[in-house]
Amino acid sequence: MLIGGRLFFALLTLVAVGTQLTVHIGLGFDPWNFFSYFTNLSNIFASVVLLISGYRVMVGKRPSELDDATRGTATIAMAVVGLVFGALLAGQDLGSLLPWVNFVVHYLMPVVMVADWLFQPPRSRLTVKHLWYWLLYPVAYLVYSLVRGSFVNWYAYWFIDPMRAGGWGGVAVFAVAISIGFLVVSLAMLGLGNKLERQVSY
């Protein structure tokens, strides 16, 4: 993806998330809850990755293995955001979520991040060991959500809420299913990233 494209989509996403945060606070909702949504965290993360990678292209700095692995983390997280939204949340009451913000964070950015990965594949050859690196973020998020939720009795998504998912057994089933989804997407991104021709730019 061209430098301008990365910067544009990064800024668009930050504006979208910032706009929704303003709405969230204006309605008297807890800001901490806002930043407890995987979608919001992942979109902010992806935006930062796009900004940094775009800057690196401008200054001509070659990406390191860590850079590629981090970009992979953001790409996989956003791909799963799109898949999970389509499978489990589409059609749900989205409350105060603005339609255009919903489009950006749930539809546009997952496509943008995957397209960026495919058109500008990682310079480093990534291996299976990177799967563990990529899974740290979603696992840490799940642990955080379940621990915090047990204390404040609030969960960002119905499928990790024991009262709505059929008890802790239901939560476990959904957690395993989503983890498998992460693994499948990670394997796909790993394979495609290694197969596609390396480009000069990041």
Image: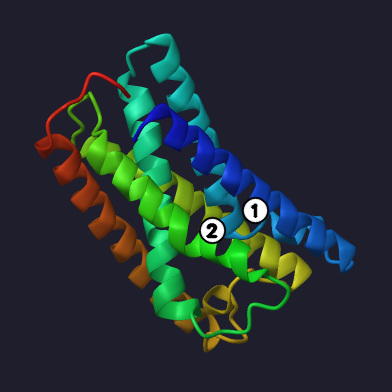
Counting residues from the start of the chain, the first of labels 2 and 1 encountered is 1
**Label annotation for residue 16:** 1
Q: Tag 1: Cα neighbours inside 10 Å, few (<14), some, or many (≥20)?
A: many
Give coordinates of residue 164: x percent, y percent.
Answer: 59, 87
Position of the C terminus by quadrant: top left
Q: Nearer the viewer, residue 34 or 53?
A: 53
Horizontal arrangement in the rendering, residue 62 relative to residue 197 (left or right)? right
**Label annotation for residue 86:** none
Give coordinates of residue 135: x percent, y percent.
Answer: 38, 48
In the picture shown, does residue 186 fall above or below 4? Answer: below
Element carrying mark 2: helix
Give coordinates of residue 91: x percent, y percent.
Answer: 52, 85
> In the image, what residue type sits under mark 2?
Val
Number of residue marks: 2
The residue under the point 39% across, 49% down is: 112
Horizontal arrangement in the rendering, residue 68 relative to residue 74 (left or right)? left
The residue under the point 33% across, 41% down is: 116
Which image quarter: residue 71? top left
Element carrying mark 1: helix
Q: Disc 2 designates what residue?
A: 105
Which image quarter: residue 38? bottom right
Q: From where the camera sits, is residue 175 visible?
A: no
The way the protein has been coloured in the rendering is rainbow
In the picture shown, does residue 81 fall above or below 7? Answer: below
> In the image, what residue type sits under mark 1?
Ala
The residue under the point 23% across, 24% down is: 123
Give coordinates of residue 22: x percent, y percent.
Answer: 81, 56
In the picture shown, does residue 65 fall above or below 79? Answer: above
